[in-house]
Image (spheres, grey):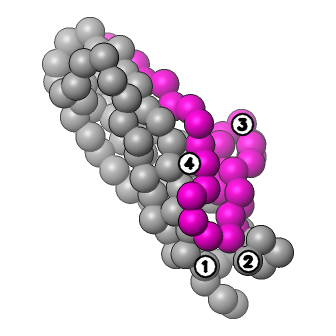
């Protein structure tokens, strides 16, 4: 089965109560990023580069230091490749499809 390259971006903001404040990002239960938030009054564009077969790949963010703050993730988008963002089992997910190639 053919693999496709897809790049996904989303915007992440944080409300930090206490440092250190960290979060993790997973795609299909695979850890893609762990970040320590050090910024004020801004957002990050988180980017995932994925090469995979057609299928559905949930994107999940979690805070490591739950009592130290919270994050908001929005504006998920495919910037390159044969994919689209869908809601799958309550999570934003990347759908890679031959039909989108």
- The label on residue 63 is none
Can you tell which of label 3 and label 1 is closer to the viewer?
1
Report the residue marked by disc 1: 4
Vertical position of residue 70 compared to residue 88: above or below: above
Tell me where the magenta segment starts and ends, as one range. 67-96
Disc 3 to disc 2, C-alpha distance: 25 Å
Disc 4 to disc 3, C-alpha distance: 10 Å
Q: For mark 4, give the secondary structure.
A: strand
State which tag comes first along the sequence, 4 or 2: 4
Can you tell which of label 3 and label 2 is closer to the viewer?
2
Vertical position of residue 24 compared to residue 96: above or below: above
Q: For mark 3, give the secondary structure.
A: loop
Disc 4 to disc 2, C-alpha distance: 21 Å
Report the residue marked by disc 2: 101
x 50%, y 68%: residue: 50
Report the residue marked by disc 4: 59
Q: For mark 1, give the secondary structure.
A: strand
Mark 2 is surrounded, within 10 Å at the Cα level, by few (under 14), some (14 to 19) or many (20 or more) other residues, namely few
Report the residue marked by disc 3: 90
């Amino acid at each position: 089965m053919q693999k496709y390259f897809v790049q996904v971006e989303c915007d992440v903001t944080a409300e930090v109560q206490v440092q250190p404040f960290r979060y993790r990002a997973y795609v299909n239960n695979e850890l893609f990023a762990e970040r320590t938030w050090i910024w004020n009054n801004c957002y990050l564009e988180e980017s995932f580069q994925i090469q995979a077969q057609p299928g559905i790949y949930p994107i999940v963010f979690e805070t490591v230091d739950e009592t130290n703050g919270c994050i908001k993730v929005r504006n998920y988008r495919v910037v390159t490749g044969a994919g689209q963002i869908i809601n799958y089992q309550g999570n934003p997910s990347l759908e890679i499809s031959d039909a989108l190639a």
